Amino acid sequence: MADNTWMNSQITDAVTQTNVKVLGDAPAESMGMLYQMMAQSTGMSMQNMVANQQHKNSIDSAVVTGAVSLLYTLDTAAEGKATQEVLSGNPVAETMAALKGVLASFRNESSNAPKFNT
């Protein structure tokens, strides 16, 4: 108990005990607040990841839909020209195209291709 001064000793003891209690509870309260903030920030980051995945899937779906509709609207001539542009300059593709042309000429009976003994 505090010495008797002009202030009541019971008041001094009460204030001292309150100060000691506040100082003793401060680490536990600050750790509790830290854990709450960490839990909240972790939850928010998970929500953001889920939202980003959902937006990415929406964009992917739109891209696939656009590509499929483009494929269905292409005409045959454009497909042939695009294929020719892709395969031109490729020696294997050019050789195979030439061989395919030769085979097609042999199959055609009315063509002027030379006839072999068959």
Image (tube, rainbow, N blue to C red):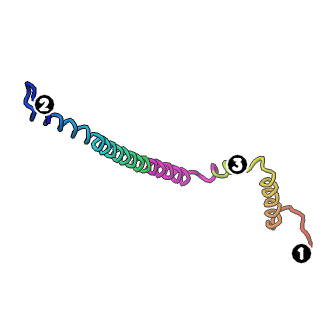
Q: Nearer the viewer, residue 108 or 26?
A: 26
* Residue occupying the far right of the picture: 117
Q: Secondary structure at mark 2?
A: loop
Mark 2 or 1, which is nearer the eye?
A: 2
**63 within the magenta span:** yes
Q: Horizontal placement of 71 versus 24: left or right?
A: right
Region of the chain picked out in magenta, as a range: 55-78
| Element carrying mark 1 | loop
**Residue type at tag 1:** Thr
Label located before the other in sequence (2 or 1): 2
User: How many marks are shown on the rendered structure?
Assistant: 3
**Image quarter of the N terminus:** top left
Return the residue nearer the eye: 105 or 95.
Answer: 95
Kindly identify which numbered label has been placed on residue 81: none
First along the sequence among labels 3 and 1: 3
Q: Which residue, given by chain and number where applicable, does mark 1 sit on?
A: 118
Name the quadrant containing residue 106. Answer: bottom right
Q: CA distance from mark 3 to mark 1?
A: 38 Å
The amino acid type found where label 3 is placed reads Val
- 3D distance between C-alphas at marks 3 and 2: 100 Å
Above or below, 71 relative to 18: below
- Is residue 29 shown above or below 112? above
